Amino acid sequence: QAIRDAGKEPGKDIKVVSIDGTEGAVQALAQGQLNGVVESNPRFGPLAFQTVEKFLSGDPIPQKIIIQDRIYTPQNAEENLDAAY
């Protein structure tokens, strides 16, 4: 809203990128109001807790655990709306 109040067009006059991958942000991206959305998904919380539990139990855990967040672009936002949370 602040961008519009300044007489500018979000996503056009000022580049806007969102972090978290919410459905509202991906929808705004599909509508041209944002330039990009990077997911930081809360659904990875259970994996983090499972890993801590394994560690505390003395079980081996991998040195790296790679999680796959999505990067939404104007080109893929519309088709990926259902994946946003």
Image (cartoon, rainbow, N blue to C red):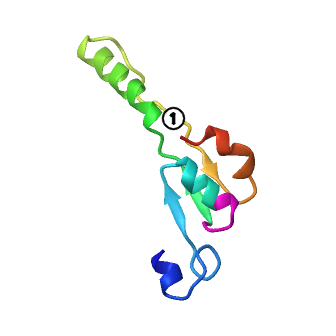
> Does residue 76 appear left or right of residue 62 in this picture?
right
Residue 13 falls in image quadrant: bottom right
Viewer can see residue 73? yes
Q: Please identify the dominant SS of the magenta region.
A: loop
Query: In x, y percent, where is residue 31?
Result: 69, 63
Query: In x, y percent, where is residue 40?
Result: 47, 45
Q: Which residue is mark 1?
A: 67
**Looking at the image, which residue is at 57% across and 79% down?**
14
User: Against 61, is 8 above or below?
Assistant: below
Viewer can see residue 64? no
Query: In x, y percent, where is residue 73?
Result: 67, 57
Q: Nearer the viewer, residue 65 or 68?
A: 68
Residue 83 highlighted magenta (yes or no): no
**Looking at the image, which residue is at 53% across and 47% down?**
39
User: Against 67, is 22 above or below?
Assistant: below
- Per the rendered image, the range of residues in magenta is 29-34
Residue 32 highlighted magenta (yes or no): yes
Q: Nearer the viewer, residue 17 or 26?
A: 26
**Looking at the image, which residue is at 53% across and 81% down?**
4
Query: In x, y percent, where is residue 46?
Result: 40, 25
